Amino acid sequence: MSQTLPLLVTHSGSFHCDEAFAYVVLRLALGLKAPGQDHRLVRTRDAALIAQGDYVWDVGLVFDPAANRFDHHQRGAPTREDGTPFSSAGLVWQQFGEAAVRALGGGENSATIAADLDRAVIRRIDEIDNGVAGSREPLDLAALVGDCNLTWDTPAEGRQKAEDAAFLEAVALLEGVLRRRVDVLRSRLAADAMVVAAHQASADPRVLELERGMPWKNAVFSHELPVIYAVYPVPNGNWMVDAMPPEPHSFAQRLPLPEAWAGLQEGALVEASKVPDAVFVHVRRFVGAARSRAGAVAMAREALRIGGLPPA
């Protein structure tokens, strides 16, 4: 093992999403910054060099977390509980994912965020790398990383150095994606408690009144709240009336805003809704706005009445 800077080793040649992502995770979890600065990165298939590595992934034909070996190409390589094979990204994530999330500001929710990312992102990397994904998208992470590889007609002279540089470009891409995703999940979890508290304080349980814009629909689903509309301010000074979808990722609404309001603005909408400061309703009826909180709440309550729902 190295006695100077830690030696991190993966394979040379063309690269895939799994080993580039695994390197991102290792660097974050171990508090490392740049190769040559606080660690050494070697991309090789030389068995002697691989044996010297402090951390080795996607090469070496060994999976041994205690020895920091994370390959998945050997017979008997580990799989998930349902039999899905791990890639090097999945193997490294099981060991270092939570620490990486914590390094990115996950805080007390780091374990929850790491588990969410494992389900939604890491598992997908595993499936694609092992050829067991049911489908592929032209802009999935694996495809974007694949595009970072050198083209077939790149000159042979200096190719190894160029490949190593291209690998680091892919790593930078993936680190940016991971940083943003962790921040999104962190903020969503922070919003969850605020949405529940706001719902408890709202005069009508069907109209969620928020003091500021934040992710709210996931909290409504996860806590099974009877929300039909959410009301919240936006930077231009208006207050939005946002309709709740019936299920996650749906473009429908539990109760669209009234059909008679669809596509109306300003005076025409004021006349139709009887709300003095109503601003607009989208032609698809999933969102509208007023100039005040009271106006937005009035729009929501009138929409409930028109929709045939009794007063709360």
Image: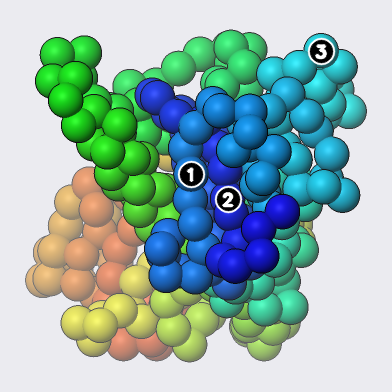
Q: Could you give the CA–CA distance between mark 2 and mark 3, rounded to whole angstroms? A: 23 Å
The residue tagged 1 is: 42
Measured in 3D between alpha carbons, the distance from the residue under mark 3 to the one under mark 1, in whole angstroms, is 25 Å
Q: Earlier in the sequence, mark 2 or mark 3?
A: 2
In the rendered image of this protein, does residue 107 appear above or below residue 264?
below
Pointer 3 with pointer 1, Cβ within 8 A? no
Disc 2 marks which residue? 8
Query: Is residue 298 placed above or below 141 in the rendered structure?
Result: below
Q: Residue at x 54, y 26 (%)?
A: 45
Left or right position of 156 against 44: left
Q: Position of residue 49 (x, y in %)?
A: 59, 38
Which residue in the structure is indicated by mark 3? 75
Q: Residue at x 76, y 63 (%)?
A: 111
Which mark's residue is nearer the viewer, 2 or 3? 2
Of the two numbered discs 2 and 1 on the same chain, state the one appearing first in sequence: 2
Distance between the alpha carbons at the discs numbered 2 and 1: 6 Å
Q: Amino acid at mark 3?
A: Arg
Residue 134 in the image: x percent, y percent? 58, 12
